[in-house]
Amino acid sequence: MANREALRELQTRLANRLQAAKAEGSSVSSWLAVQTAGRRYLLPLAHSGEIFPWTGVQAVPYTQPWYLGIANLRGSLMGVVDLGGLLGYPVARTEQALTESSLLAVNPVLEVNAALMVDSLLGLRGTDAFVSSEAPAEDAPEFFGTLYTDAEGATWQELNLQVLAQSPVFLSIGV
């Protein structure tokens, strides 16, 4: 119950910050910052949808290990993808760890009924939050964007959700 209240509070804070930035006419943050499998990612706000607390997921047989199953999220059936597992960093999670995770629906404009499971939401970020950036490695997946470094030296990988949603890796859930 406390987890749901904390998620509602985070969603309210994020909505208030977005509204305040729009009202001031300043450049609004462009990413939702998340952490999964011990790594930090930046997801474009324009392609991110609603945030949900962990809910029961109905497993689907004969699918990739990173495809967790189907969940009913506000009346819509969505495939749930473990983002860390999809990116090659599978993590064995306990029931407790799952209850602390969040589901981030992919924006319906991308035309996939999917939600990404992430371990934690870290707020909004804009380019001003980083001190350096570099292009993704040549062998990086096509949906990897710029790699950013913040003032504390932490690295953040930008993910292009539009490219990810059309990627054969993402769309091929069967084993």
Image (cartoon, rainbow, N blue to C red):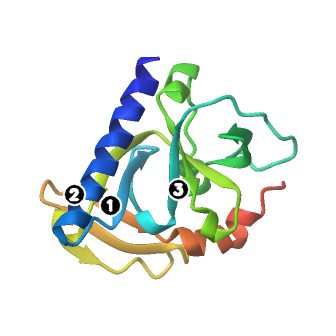
Give coordinates of residue 170: x percent, y percent. Answer: 68, 63
Give the image quarter of residue 61. top right
Give coordinates of residue 44: x percent, y percent. Answer: 42, 66
| SS at mark 1 in the image | strand
Residue 174 located left or right of residue 137: right
Task: Looking at the picture, tell me which residue is in the foreground, 49 or 141.
Answer: 49
Give coordinates of residue 166: x percent, y percent. Answer: 67, 73
Relative to 99, say whether 148 is above or below. below
Please say whether residue 166 is visible from this viewpoint. yes
- Which residue sits furthest front? 23
Residue 159 located left or right of residue 165: left
- Which residue sits furthest top? 1
Give coordinates of residue 130: x percent, y percent. Answer: 18, 66
| SS at mark 2 in the image | helix
Q: In the rendered structure, which disc, 2 or 1, sits on the residue that comes first in sequence?
A: 2
Three-letter amino acid code at the position of disc 1: Trp
Relative to 98, say whether 27 is above or below. below
